[in-house]
Amino acid sequence: MWIAVCVGAAVGNALWTALSKPLVQAIPPLRMILLMRVVQTGILLVPFLMIRGVPASADFWFLVAAIGVLQAIRWVTIMHGVRRDYFSTYAMYNTAPLFTLLLAPATLPERFGPAVWVGVLAIIAGGALFYRTSRVSAYGLVGAVVTALVNIIGKHGVNQVHPLVFLFFMSASPAVVLGIVYPFTRRSTREDVRWPRELRQLAPVALIAVASGVFFFYGLWLDTATRVTAVARVNLVFGFLLSYLMLKETSEWQWKVAGTALILAGTVAVAL
């Protein structure tokens, strides 16, 4: 079951990423992520009010605060990296499963044998073939480490509360953080803001991102952070298919096919 929901998360992730490609060039990264999080929070408010059951412990609210800051850092960093160098940013970002594998044992009861290590390395190698580049992106590496931390904290969160409730806080908390930071950045850049138009552009993308997040957090609820993070990287395969079907991108398809083979082989090794 956990594999099926992770694949669902991967499909949704690939779709909203593909749809956001033209938007990230037109909307400043911080504002784009802020608007995305505001829309996602609004969508998730309904299931949150239906389920409720929020823990009163200080530990839970520390997780919420930490994940808000980390989520804000992650997506603003990635969006800045994508604007500068798309390929090197995502090549480095896809090393997140390795950092999860390395960091998770410090706070979670996750210990794995050689098969998972080989599978994770195969997935990362497959991702490297997708985004062939000789450059190392600091943005991508920071995004990968922060993603590992977010997923580990997310695993702690879904151990305490329903996945949809924690996903609501996953959207609301970074929205608060970015909402506090944004006015200061806007004064310094004096951007021409077109909120209504940008909200309309981002709403479909945010809805798909919510669906992807629901699948991903149900996966975290059902299995380990390490395996879920690794299997979710099959989003690269679906992204490859979408880039062909939607954008007719066929350049270097041989490398993407080879990357797909490695990712699928690594996914099987991790899932067994």
Image (cartoon, grey):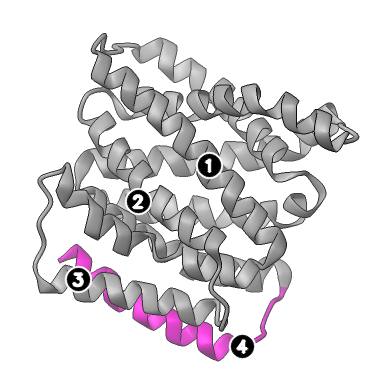
Q: Quadrant of residue 243?
A: bottom right
Q: Is mark 1 on a helix, strand or loop?
A: helix
Measured as percent of width and height from the top left, residue 54 is found at 31, 12
Q: Is residue 148 left or right of residue 248?
A: left
Per the image, the residue denoted by label 2 is 148
Q: Is residue 257 left or right of residue 191?
A: left
Q: What element carries label 2?
A: helix
Q: Dots 3 and 1: beta carbons under 8 Å?
A: no
Please state which of residues 59 and 119 is positioned toward the viewer in this rendering: 59
Q: Residue at x 40, y 62 (%)?
A: 233
Q: Which mark is residue 161?
A: none
Which numbered disc flags the more N-terminal residue, 2 or 1? 1
Which numbered disc flags the more N-terminal residue, 4 or 3? 3
The span shown in magenta is 248-272
Q: Residue 252 carries which label?
A: 4
Kind of residue sitting beneath label 3: Trp
